[in-house]
Image (cartoon, grey):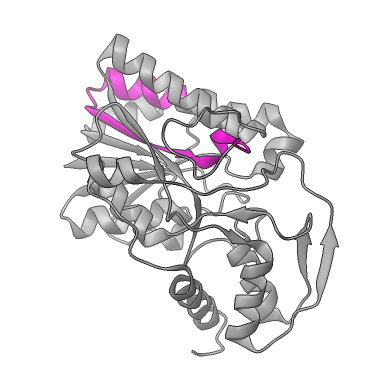
Amino acid sequence: MRIVVTGGAGFIGSHVIDAYRAAGHDVLVIDSLWEHGGGRRANVPENVSLVHMDVRDEAIGRVFADFAPEIVSHHAAQHSVAISARDPLYDAQINVIGLLNVLECAQKSGVRKVIFASSGATFGTPERLPITDDTPQHPSSPYGITKMVGEHYLRFYKASRGLDFTALRYGNVYGPRQDPNGEAGVISVFIGKFLAHEPVRIDWDGDQTRDYVFVEDIARVNLAALERGSGGCYVIGTGVRTSVNQIYRRLVEITGFEAPVIHAPQRPGDARDAQFDATRARLELGWTPSTDLPDGIRATYEYFERLSGRGV
C-alpha cells in the first residue's frame, strides 16, 4: 500500500513508519518538525521521503495528488496537555483545523481510509475503571476535547463522504525516541533527568495513575488497523495502572540513583487515573500488548543511555 504518515518524524509516527516499511508498504512522511512536537529528520529513514509541511497547509492536497496514497495515518498533533491548557486556540488550530485540512485533501485525492491517533484523554477522569470503548467521554483538557472532536469529524466524513477511518485512543505511550526535554511523557522526561543526575519534578501527589503502552505495541496496532476496524474507535492500553511515584521508584532501581524530587501542583487539565480495557481491540483488530512496563522502561532507559554516549 501507499501510505502517508503525518507527524511521521515524531516519536510515535516514526515507529509506525518502521512497522509499515517492515511489512513492505510504500511510505511518505509529512511533518512540520515543530520544536515542541519532537519531530526530527533523524527519525525518518534515508530512503523514506519527508515533506516539511504543516498539516494546516493547503499544499498538502498537491502532495496527496502526486503520491496517490490509499491510507493516511494521521499522527501530526499538538500532543501536550500542558500546552493545550495554556494555549487552547493553538491546540485547536493544529488538532482540529489541521485534521480537517487532511480529511478534505484525503477525500478529494481518493484516499480509502484514515487511521487517527486519538487519545485516552478524551475520557477525562471517568466515574469507574477500567475505561472501555463505551465509557462516556468527558475530557478535562483542551487536548482531550480536540481529540474527541476529531473522532466526531471522522464519523461525519465516513457517513457523508465515504472516507473510512479507524481511531486509536492511546494510553500513555512511551519508548525510544520520545523527547526527554518535552512536557509530555513522564518516563522519558524522568530518564533524561536521571541520566543527567538532575532533580525530577513530580506534580500533584505523584499517586495519579496512567496506563503506559510501549511504542512498538502502538506501531503493531497501526499495522492491524490498515485492514481492520472500519469506522471503529478503540481504547489501546495494557489494563495496568501505574503511578508516577512507581515510575520514579522503578528508575531508582534501574539506575541506582536517588534523584532529588521537586514537588509541584496539579497541572491544569490533568486527569486523576486511567486504565484501559482493550478487549474490543483484541477481538476486532487482533491486537494485544506484548511488552510489560518493567521491560519497556528498561529498554527505553538503555536507548537513552546509548544516545548519551554512556554505554549500556
Residue occupying image coordinates x 70% and y 73%: 193
Count of marks overlaid on the render: 0
Residue 44 occupies which quadrant of the picture? bottom left
Image position of 15 (left or right of 311): left
Query: For residue 113: magenta?
Result: yes
Please name whichever residue, 283 or 308, is drawn nearer the observer in this view of the structure. Answer: 283
Please name whichever residue, 41 or 297, is drawn nearer the observer in this view of the structure. Answer: 297
Q: Residue furthest front?
A: 128
Residue 58 visible somewhere in the drawing: no
Residue 172 visible somewhere in the drawing: yes
Image position of 271 (left or right of 21): right
Residue occupying image coordinates x 36% and y 61%: 216
Query: For residue 33: magenta?
Result: no
Q: Is residue 160 above or below residue 281?
A: above
Magenta residues?
100-127
Residue 192 occupies which quadrant of the picture? bottom right
Residue 231 occupies which quadrant of the picture? top left
Residue occupying image coordinates x 21% and y 32%: 68
Which corner quadrant holds the N terminus?
top left
Image spot of residue 309 (x, y percent): 55, 86
Q: Is residue 183 above or below residue 235?
A: below
Please name whichever residue, 126 or 118, is drawn nearer the observer in this view of the structure. Answer: 126
